[in-house]
Image (tube, rainbow, N blue to C red):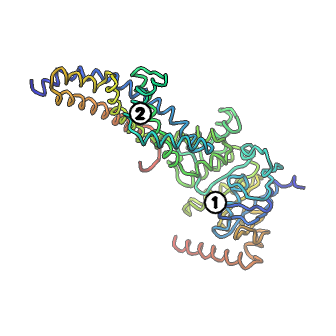
């Protein structure tokens, strides 16, 4: 039964230097399933994603990723990370390498793919994210939206079984958000499992199989996207969605 | 003989010391670089005892005069049976001294690389060594470059101390000229001019390299 899940996190407690962020949160992601995590800032969404690949070490709890228990002893975490893709809010591309090298290098040194194969793959994923002809540019010569699409391409090139996206559009201007969201929707159709932190309600509705609402380091409510977004059970969820919608309306008014 | 004639007469002789001065500087800098690397690695990524050794080394070296360090190596070590010729002793003293400063330069440069770069490398499955080799070092060297050049130029000037134990470099040659002509002012003025030209040349060259290696698209700096 656990074979159906790409990711199982149970009773995870984690934090930073004595400051507890996750208070025994549990979450499961099926193979190919797309789960959107929402919640106010400080609720532990980002830490949850990082803990899933031990970028933040959980204090207690159990994590099983693609059938391998990460919280056990003697796990080669690097090999496990090579099976996952992580996209950060601030892109985190390597600024001293060309776009092509950003995508080629991880394949070559982590997956031991030959350089020719890696270059071929890089061109393919760049096409997938709608970026051609920027191979030889450097990340800082690109717009934020382009940089984030390169970051997505870099993660895609590793052929991940699960994609972690940590607020992939919240550092972007509204017009640049669109291109990144479109790219992500396209990738979502390919059937890779995704765990996405986002505040983009329309995107969440389009892409999610399930929405999880978090607060204070635990899951408050979860379920079908339609249900959670339009008819949530918990007052806290309703309140949060109201504040997001209000903010969005304000932003739209300002744009006009 | 006026100052101008004096310089024309003796400056070439003193300037010939540049070869030895630059040899001293280059070898010391290289030794310093090679020693600084393990010091930084130990300090930033090592286990506690390594960290302590690295930090103590830096503190002690920076907290004592270079001249005393040179004397310790050249005059002190022979008494416990370790003997170096003057050139080796000078390079050891200058190099091991520079290592402490270079270690601090690299430590600051590595600290200047955002945490997000480490996270990205880790998330892709890089080992610590790969992260250092492909992500940290290339960026740290760029950040460190101006300070490294400064350290190199400092070494050019500090290598004058080697003249005290008999290395015939720029300052020693100026000593000779001063003793021979009894015109100390002009002799050391000539030495000063040569040092200045050398230092200026390297600072200027470095600015060119900085421009060449700047990360494309990077604003500021």
Q: Quick check: A178 left or right of B154?
A: right
Q: Any mark on residue A74, and which?
A: none
The x, y position of residue B208, in whole percent, is 37, 36
Q: Position of residue A256 (x, y in %)?
A: 51, 72
How many marks do you count on the picture? 2
B162 relative to B193 in the view: left or right: right
Q: Which quadrant holds residue B180? A: top left
What label sits on residue A17 in the rendered view? 1
Front-most of A221 and A256?
A221
- Neighbor class of circle 1 (other Cα within 10 Å; few <14, some 14-19, many 20+) is few
x and y, in percent, of residue A33 in the image: 79, 58
Q: CA distance from mark 1 to mark 2?
A: 41 Å
Quarter that holds the N terminus of chain A: bottom right
> Closer to the observer: label 1 or label 2?
2
Q: Residue at x 12, y 23 (%)?
A: B5
Q: Residue at x 38, y 35 (%)?
A: B66
Seen from the viewer's position, the closer of residues B218 and A2 is A2
**Left or right: B126, with B3 as reference point:** right
Q: Residue furthest right?
A: A1
Q: Is residue A254 above or below residue B165?
A: below
Q: Which mark is residue B69?
A: 2
């Amino acid at each position: 039964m656990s074979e159906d899940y790409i990711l199982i996190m149970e009773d995870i407690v984690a934090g930073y230097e004595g400051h507890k962020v996750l208070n025994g949160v549990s979450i499961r992601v099926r193979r190919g399933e797309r789960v959107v995590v929402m919640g106010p800032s400080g609720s532990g969404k980002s830490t949850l994603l990082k803990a899933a690949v031990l970028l933040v070490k959980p204090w207690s709890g159990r994590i099983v990723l693609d059938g391998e228990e990460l919280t056990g002893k003697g796990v080669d975490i690097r090999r496990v990370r090579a099976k996952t893709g992580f996209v950060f809010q601030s892109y985190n591309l390597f600024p001293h390498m060309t776009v092509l090298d950003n995508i080629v290098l991880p394949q070559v040194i982590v997956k031991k793919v030959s350089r020719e194969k890696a270059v071929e793959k890089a061109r393919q994923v760049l096409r997938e994210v709608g970026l051609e002809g920027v191979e030889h540019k450097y990340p800082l010569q690109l717009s934020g939206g382009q940089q984030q699409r390169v970051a997505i391409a870099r993660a895609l090139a590793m052929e991940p079984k699960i994609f972690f996206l940590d607020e992939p559009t919240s550092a972007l201007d509204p017009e640049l958000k669109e291109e990144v969201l479109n790219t992500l929707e396209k990738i979502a159709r390919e059937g890779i499992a995704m765990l996405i932190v986002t505040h983009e309600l329309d995107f969440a509705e389009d892409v999610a199989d399930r929405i999880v609402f978090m607060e204070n380091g635990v899951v408050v409510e979860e379920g079908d996207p339609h249900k959670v977004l339009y008819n949530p059970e918990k007052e806290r969820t309703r309140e949060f969605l109201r504040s997001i919608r209000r903010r969005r309306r304000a932003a739209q008014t300002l744009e006009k | 003989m006026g100052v101008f004639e004096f310089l024309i007469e003796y400056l070439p002789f003193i300037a010939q010391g540049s070869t030895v001065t630059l040899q001293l500087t280059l070898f010391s800098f290289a030794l310093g670089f090679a020693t600084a690397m393990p010091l930084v690695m130990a300090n930033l990524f090592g286990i506690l005892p390594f960290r302590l050794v690295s930090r103590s080394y830096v503190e002690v070296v920076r907290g004592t005069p270079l001249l005393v360090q040179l004397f310790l190596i050249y005059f002190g070590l022979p008494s416990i049976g370790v003997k170096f010729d003057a050139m080796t002793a000078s390079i050891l003293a200058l190099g091991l001294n520079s290592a402490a400063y270079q270690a601090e330069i690299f430590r600051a440069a590595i600290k200047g690389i955002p945490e997000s770069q480490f996270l990205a490398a880790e998330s892709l499955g890089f080992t610590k060594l790969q992260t250092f080799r492909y992500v940290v070092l290339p960026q740290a060297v760029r950040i460190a470059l101006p300070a490294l050049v400064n350290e190199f130029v400092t070494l050019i000037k500090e290598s004058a101390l080697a003249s005290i134990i008999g290395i015939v470099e720029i300052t020693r040659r100026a000593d000779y000229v001063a003793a021979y002509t009894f015109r100390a002012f002009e002799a050391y003025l000539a030495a000063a001019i040569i040092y200045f030209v050398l230092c200026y040349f390297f600072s200027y060259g470095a600015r060119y390299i900085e421009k060449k290696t700047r990360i494309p698209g990077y604003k500021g700096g």
